[in-house]
Image (cartoon, rainbow, N blue to C red):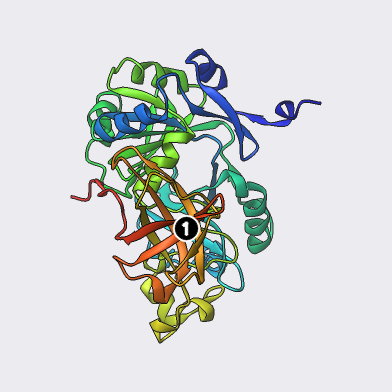
């Protein structure tokens, strides 16, 4: 049997095919990788105008935000969930007992029509079944977890995204980075968050499939918008130094090693009352053995995922986690996780590609400035 027949299909698959998307399997879904104008065009248009991504493969779910559930969630999510304000989102993770990252996520707090408070959580497609199992086990059952199977997830990103979207959904015009709003469009629910995965100002929209084409057809009337696939999504997030699960993050890498310690609530750091806290929160910061770094190749050779990294004396010091040609900087870039003592910005390191060691320089992250709307 053709394995493609076993893959999940996006609700908008027909739309992508009609728009000449190149489809490939990713995280058990058939996903658009790029459209006819190619990855570099999609990337640069997102940086200068607006890019539209279908990311409906992500796991979207809601959970009631009552005290009992909050206490259980805080065992595995190192945030102070009581302090998360209604209408706000926060980046976090699900951690295992050693502090390894089972998945990273965005968790938001919203109110329904009856003033009941709930969490809206978006998690990675590749970790769907693991995440659902862990959440069900932690909460004691899956009864309180509602999967948003009938909602697609679109991301509109770029400097023109706000003006365009506000002409269709005026309520979003003043949303700031990591703020979230539930609105009704044609009497159907849309959750709009000011977030994304590109480093640009933009929005993610969880849209009832009954009205998805109504929104989509209006967006497609704007010439500044380019349809974008996973190819440009990856190069954009790499330039913005945003982590990808399976690359910079996995269940053996903890938030400190991934340079994500900022995402753990200050109060939780002090109390150390979450999975793996003793492994992550160490009084002496110099005890940290590994750290995520950025690097620029000194040649046209592109560092690739799992390339080994060496110091100048040929000692193995780490591994490339993500690498690509940067359309914005016009040079090969990468992130890696290396031994902390070699991580000084400006240091020369060497990555091994096809049996040859190639010189690179450690640079400050992010590679490209973030343009989030914070004021």
User: Which residue, as the protein is rendered here, is positioned at the far bottom?
Assistant: 284
Q: Is residue 257 visible?
A: no
Which residue is depicted at the point 67% across and 48% down? 129
Counting from the top left corner in percent of width and height, residue 345 is at 30, 66
Q: Which residue is mark 1?
A: 351
Q: Is residue 43 above or below residue 322?
A: above
Counting from the top left corner in percent of width and height, residue 262 is at 36, 67
Q: Could you say which quadrant of the image residue 185 lies in?
A: top left
Which residue is depicted at the point 37% across and 30% down? 40
Q: Is residue 283 visible?
A: yes
Counting from the top left corner in percent of width and height, residue 70 is at 51, 64
Residue in the foreground of this view, choosing between 99 and 94:
99
- Looking at the rendered image, the quarter that the N terminus falls into is top right
Give the structural element (helix, strand or loop) at label 1.
strand
Q: Is residue 251 above or below residue 6?
A: below
Q: Could you say which quadrant of the image residue 331 lies in?
A: top left
Counting every numbered tag in the picture gives 1
Which residue is depicted at the point 27% across and 41% down? 201
Counting from the top left corner in percent of width and height, residue 133 is at 68, 55
Q: Is residue 283 above or below residue 304?
A: below
User: Which residue, as the protein is rendered here, is positioned at the far left?
Assistant: 375
Which residue is depicted at the point 27% across and 22% down? 224
Crowd tier of the residue under label 1, counting other residues whose Cα lies within 10 Å: few below 14, some 14–19, many 20 or above: many
Residue in the foreground of this view, choosing between 227 and 337:
337
Relative to residue 346, is residue 301 drawn left or right? right
């Amino acid at each position: 049997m053709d394995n493609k027949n076993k893959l999940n299909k996006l609700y908008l698959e027909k739309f992508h095919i009609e728009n000449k998307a190149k489809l490939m399997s990713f995280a058990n879904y058939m996903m658009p990788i790029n459209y006819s104008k190619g990855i570099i065009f999609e990337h640069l248009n997102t940086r200068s105008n607006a890019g539209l991504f279908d990311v409906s493969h992500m796991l979207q779910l809601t959970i009631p935000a009552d005290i009992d559930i909050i206490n259980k969630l805080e065992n595995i999510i190192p945030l102070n969930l009581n302090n998360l304000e209604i209408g706000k989102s926060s980046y976090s993770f699900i951690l295992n007992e050693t502090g390894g990252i089972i998945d990273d996520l965005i968790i938001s707090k919203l109110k329904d029509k009856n003033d009941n408070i709930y969490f809206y959580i978006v998690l990675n497609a590749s970790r769907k079944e693991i995440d659902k199992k862990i959440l069900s086990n932690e909460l004691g059952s899956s009864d309180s977890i509602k999967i948003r199977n009938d909602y697609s997830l679109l991301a509109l990103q770029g400097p023109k995204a706000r003006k365009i979207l506000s002409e269709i959904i005026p309520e979003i015009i003043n949303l700031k980075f990591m703020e979230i709003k539930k609105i009704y469009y044609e009497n159907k629910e849309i959750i709009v968050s000011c977030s994304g995965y590109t480093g640009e100002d933009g929005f993610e929209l969880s849209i009832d499939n009954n009205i998805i084409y109504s929104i989509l057809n209006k967006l497609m009337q704007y010439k500044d918008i380019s349809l974008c696939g996973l190819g440009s999504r990856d190069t954009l997030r790499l330039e913005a130094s945003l982590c990808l699960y399976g690359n910079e993050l996995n269940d053996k890498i903890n938030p400190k090693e991934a340079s994500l310690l900022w995402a753990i609530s200050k109060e939780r750091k002090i109390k150390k009352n979450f999975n793996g806290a003793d492994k992550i929160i160490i009084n002496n910061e110099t005890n940290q053995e590994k750290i995520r770094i950025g690097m620029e190749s000194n040649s046209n050779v592109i560092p690739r995922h799992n390339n080994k990294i060496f110091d100048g004396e040929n000692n193995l010091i780490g591994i490339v986690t993500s690498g690509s040609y940067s359309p914005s900087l016009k040079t090969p870039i990468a992130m890696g996780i290396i031994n902390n003592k070699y991580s000084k910005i400006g240091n020369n390191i060497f990555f091994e590609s096809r049996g040859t060691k190639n010189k690179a320089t450690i640079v400050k992250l992010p590679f490209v400035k973030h343009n989030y709307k914070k004021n």
